[in-house]
Amino acid sequence: MLRSRKIGFVLSGAAMVSLLLAGCGSTNTTGSSAGNNTSSQTGTAPSTGSKNITIGYVDWAEDVATSYLWKDLLTQKGYHVTLTSMSDAGPLFAGLSKGGLNVFLDTWLPTTHKAYIQQFGSNLVDLGKWYEGGTTIGFVVPKYVYDSGIHSIADLNAHASEFGNQIVGIDPGAGEMAIAKKAVQDYGLKLHLTASSSAAMLTVLQKDYAAKKPVVVTLWSPHWAFTKYKLKYLSDPKGVFGKAGWIQTEANKKWAAKNPTVVGWFKNFKLTPQQLGSLELDINSASSKNAGVEKWIKNNQSVVNSWFQ
């Protein structure tokens, strides 16, 4: 999902290492979060395993939300958590495989990240599905566009000029972009799929939506945009984008073997569509990601407690 949404390119071993060491456009967030909601509920870190954890993430709404959530929770447990932002899923899975990253919370299966699991799976371990609400990827339009009679991907060519002859995409290494390119080919679309970033795509969507202009974007569910805006997926009669799936957590196999306690917590992690949606919205509307996470934890303490039992 989706969700690099994510199938992406295949890298040689040397290229993967050099990309990871170069940071590949990555940024790190370390240290303690400002929250104080979980410490009394979840205790401190046990003596087994490392106190240092590196979580890799890409700038996708659900990945940012869950990564910052777990940074807060693990910090309150006494761990030192580093969040490493990667440019897209290719370098992230490479880093996870090599051990530079320990955990990735946003693996979309069975379709979107399948190629990465096939390539790197021998060095990874599945920590379980945490979202089974049905993940979806595809071409999305505002409801006012859908209501005008554009219901299917096959309808786009007849209205190409209305969309400026373009479909607004996300990061070029995203698996969703690879599938979107195939959709353009399979449907013989005259529109150009433009690569940008998740943030840039959302900026275009917000601007055109406010002006009630026709716009078509690559998007995925779950995503807070479906709560904020009235959006519709264009039907995909050829089934290019695949069926609904799930999101799971992957970890470096060697790291997981040495950290059974934390692995157990991640395996207990579950969110419903409503819970994930509220987490994303709390973060999106807060003064900072940490503040949004803390608000959500305060309102969902019983849910959080269940992951640490």
Image (cartoon, helix red, strand yellow):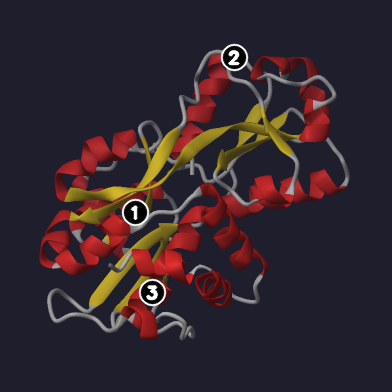
* Element class at badge 1: helix
* Mark-to-mark CA distance, 1 and 3: 22 Å
User: What's the residue type where badge 2 is placed?
Assistant: Tyr
Q: Earlier in the sequence, mark 2 or mark 3?
A: 3
| Name of the residue lying farthest toward the right | 211
Query: Which residue has dot 1 on it?
Result: 92
- Which of the image's four quarters has the C terminus? bottom left
Q: Name the residue located 66 percent from the left edge and 33 percent from the top edge.
A: 140
Q: Which residue is mark 3?
A: 73
Tell whether label 3 touches label 1 (CB within 8 Å).
no
Mark 2 in CB contact with mark 1 (< 8 angstroms)? no
Return the residue nearer the eye: 113 or 125: 125
Which label sits in the foreground, 2 or 3? 3
Q: Residue at x 68, y 19 (%)?
A: 152
From the image, state whether disc 1 or disc 3 is nearer to you: 3
Q: Position of residue 69 (x, y in %)?
A: 45, 68
In the rendered structure, the answer to whether residue 129 lies left or right of residue 152 reads left
The label on residue 202 is: none
- Of residues 127 and 250, the one nearer the viewer is 127
- Relative to 190, residue 197 above or below: below
